[in-house]
Image: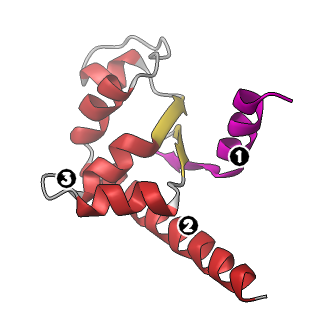
Amino acid sequence: MDSSALLAMVRADREFEIDHDGATIRARVPTRYEMQRVLSDASAGMGDLALRFTIGWRGVKVKDVIGKGNDETEAPFSRELFAEYAGQRLDLMSKLVDELMSRHNKRAGVIEEEAKN
């Protein structure tokens, strides 16, 4: 196994999904180092956490991103497009941040407990 395959496995282990308004949003729990970097950036807000660690979606339609029309085509994912989409849906941003923080804290607790043993 090469390092890129191993890295993909490690990251995949930290991925999760949440449902929101008929769409599924996929995110990755940050490592402790990544979380520290986001939290120490004075120019970053908590929404930046959601923007940085959201990695995909399903069920988001072009009409959802544009905010009008009836184009039912699934929108392609990009972080820039997600920022536009989620930036108008603060309830989604809040839900993502809460879930990221909760999962990160739980994971950090497990790591700390394992280090004691």
- 54 lies above or below 105: above
In the picture provided, is 62 more to the left or to the right than 68?
right
Residue 20 at least partly seen: yes
* SS for callout 1: helix
Observer-side mark, 3 or 2, equals 3
The structure residue drawn at horizontal position 28% and vertical position 14%, both measured from the top left corner, is 69
Is 32 magenta? The answer is: no
- SS at mark 2 in the image: helix
Mark 3 burial class by Cα count in 10 Å: few <14, some 14-19, many 20+: few
Q: Is residue 18 magenta?
A: yes
Q: Quadrant of the C terminus?
A: bottom right
Residue at mark 3: 44
Residue behind mark 2:
103
Highlighted range, magenta:
1-21
Q: According to the image, label 1 marks what residue?
A: 10
Going by the numbered disc 3, the residue's amino acid type is: Ala
Foreground mark, 1 or 2, reads 1
Find the residue positioned furthest to the left.
43
Amino acid type indicated by mark 1: Val
Q: Residue at x 26, y 19 (%)?
A: 66
Can you see residue 95?
Answer: no
Instruction: First in sequence, mark 3 or 2: give its number.
Output: 3
Instruction: Tell me where residue 3 sits by quadrant.
Output: top right
Pointer 3 with pointer 2, Cβ within 8 A: no
